Amino acid sequence: MKEFKITSNLINSQIIGKSSSIGARSVFEGTVRDINGGHDVIKLEYECYKSLAIKEGNKILDEASEKFGLIDAFCIHRVGTLEIGETAVIVVATSGHRDEAFKGCRYIIDEVKCRVPIWKKEHYQDGETEWLKGAG
């Protein structure tokens, strides 16, 4: 199943299905950390252009599947306000062998950060905020 999703709900790795027909499954989980660029982060906000994000995200999954021979590719990205430690994004790439699964997973998250219209705003302990490029 190739699918790119946007959600405002909590994400956990339990949503990822398993199949006995694959040889390798690579999973990337991006979480909210409490420090970035020397700033103490207290929370994040993600916003997106949903219809375009889903269209571009699915295009990336198709590209990764073709380029690395993936059996399945999946990505879910959260929007809204996220607290420290919460999951912002999960990517899953499956293939017959680990090398393709690793490469496919890396390709997907890197391309999502570059191309998908999702924006991240960091809220800092000192009360300042900052919109960052390459959300995800």
Image (cartoon, rainbow, N blue to C red):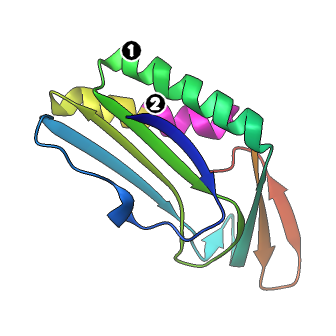
Q: Which residue is mark 2?
A: 107
Please name the residue shown 54% across and 36% down the image. 110
- Image location (x, y in percent) of residue 82: 66, 73
- Image location (x, y in percent) of residue 33: 57, 71
In the figure, residue 39 lies in which quadrant? bottom right
Query: Which callout, 2 or 1, points at the residue further toward the start of the chain?
Result: 1
- The span picked out in magenta is 107-117
Circle 2/circle 1 CB separation < 8 Å: yes
Element on which disc 1 rests: helix
- Image location (x, y in percent) of residue 104: 37, 30
Label 2 crowding class (10 Å Cα cut-off): few <14, some 14-19, many 20+? some
Magenta span contains residue 60? no
Please name the residue shown 84% across and 57% down the image. 131
Image quadrant holding the N terminus, namely: top left
Magenta span contains residue 115? yes
Label 1 crowding class (10 Å Cα cut-off): few <14, some 14-19, many 20+? few
Predominant SS of the magenta segment: helix
Q: Is residue 117 visible?
A: no
Q: Which residue is mark 1?
A: 67
Residue 81's place in the image compared with 94, above or below, is: below
Residue 94's place in the image compared with 19, above or below, is: above
The amino acid at mark 1 is: Lys
- Please state which of residues 90 and 125 is positioned toward the viewer in this rendering: 90
